[in-house]
Image (cartoon, rainbow, N blue to C red):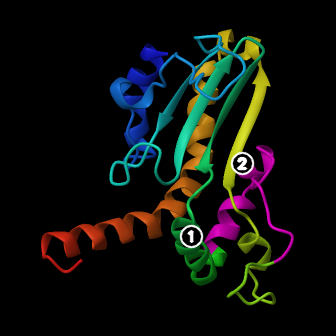
């Protein structure tokens, strides 16, 4: 996993320069959080890594993520469980730029992954026009693209090439989702520096 992260640090700048591949940041710890679990097994049975936006930081905003377990490989990216303020910013961004999002998630390569995925509301959230052309996208609470393969996929000769290919396909979605979040963070930092917050 460390070798893969180090190679992604070389290859990712060509298609996702705003995301960070660094073993110290990307690699998830092998220890399980057993505090609130009946299962006190100390170690995870998978290995995982995340590749966050350089401005937003780890576990904040949209990113790439992949995980290898004994029986599966999960490769994907997007925005998983954003807080309320982030979700509001993303939805406003979608309203203003729905054609751009539509072009990303209806591209042939993205549709091969299964299209846009994630938990959804049953109706358009309050404060948004239910007749808006982006209404179906506004119902999402998570915005992801991913593929899941059997565990043997991790040892196939094409694994790394397909990992990069999947990330390359998802990169426009990750970038789109981070645009309003990184912009808001930059404004917040400037206000703090100027003492306006």
Q: Which residue is mark 1?
A: 90
Q: Secondary structure at mark 1?
A: helix
Q: Is residue 165 left or right of residue 134?
A: left
Nearer to us in this view, 37 or 193: 37
Label 2 neighbour load within 10 Å: few <14, some 14-19, many 20+: some
Q: Is residue 92 left or right of residue 105?
A: left
Label 1 neighbour load within 10 Å: few <14, some 14-19, many 20+: many
How far from the left and from the top, in percent, is residue 88? 57, 74
How far from the left and from the top, in percent, is residue 174? 54, 54
Q: Is residue 37 magenta?
A: no
Nearer to us in this view, 114 or 85: 85
Residue range corresponding to the magenta coloring:
100-123
The answer to which quarter of the image holds residue 193 is: bottom left
Q: Secondary structure at mark 2?
A: helix
How far from the left and from the top, in percent, is residue 124? 78, 79
Q: Quadrant of the C terminus?
A: bottom left
Identify which residue is drawn at 43% across, 37% down: 12
Identify which residue is drawn at 66% across, 9% down: 155
Nearer to us in this view, 83 or 66: 83
Q: Earlier in the sequence, mark 1 or mark 2?
A: 1
Identify which residue is drawn at 68% across, 51% down: 144
Residue extending furthest toward the left? 194
Q: What label sits on residue 109 in the rendered view?
A: 2
Identify which residue is drawn at 80% across, 73% down: 136
The answer to which quarter of the image holds residue 90 is: bottom right
Q: What label sits on residue 113 in the rendered view?
A: none
Q: CA distance from mark 1 to mark 2?
A: 23 Å
- Classify 33 as above or below 141: above
């Amino acid at each position: 996993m460390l070798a893969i992260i180090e190679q992604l640090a070389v290859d990712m700048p060509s298609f996702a320069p705003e995301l960070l591949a660094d073993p110290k940041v990307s690699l998830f710890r092998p220890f399980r959080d057993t505090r609130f679990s009946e299962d006190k097994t100390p170690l995870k049975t998978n290995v995982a890594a995340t590749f966050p936006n350089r401005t937003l930081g780890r576990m904040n905003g949209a990113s790439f993520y992949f995980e290898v377990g004994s029986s599966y490989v999960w490769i994907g990216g997007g925005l998983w469980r954003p807080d309320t303020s982030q979700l509001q910013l993303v939805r406003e961004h979608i309203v203003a730029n729905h054609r751009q999002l539509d072009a990303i998630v209806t591209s042939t390569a993205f549709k091969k992954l299964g299209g846009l995925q994630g938990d959804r509301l049953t109706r358009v959230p309050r404060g948004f026009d239910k007749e808006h052309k982006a209404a179906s996208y506004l119902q999402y609470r998570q915005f992801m693209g991913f593929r899941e393969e059997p565990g043997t996929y991790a040892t196939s000769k094409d694994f790394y090439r397909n990992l990069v290919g999947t990330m390359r396909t998802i990169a426009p979605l990750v970038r789109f989702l981070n645009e309003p979040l990184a912009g808001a963070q930059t404004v917040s930092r400037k206000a703090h520096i100027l003492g306006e917050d």
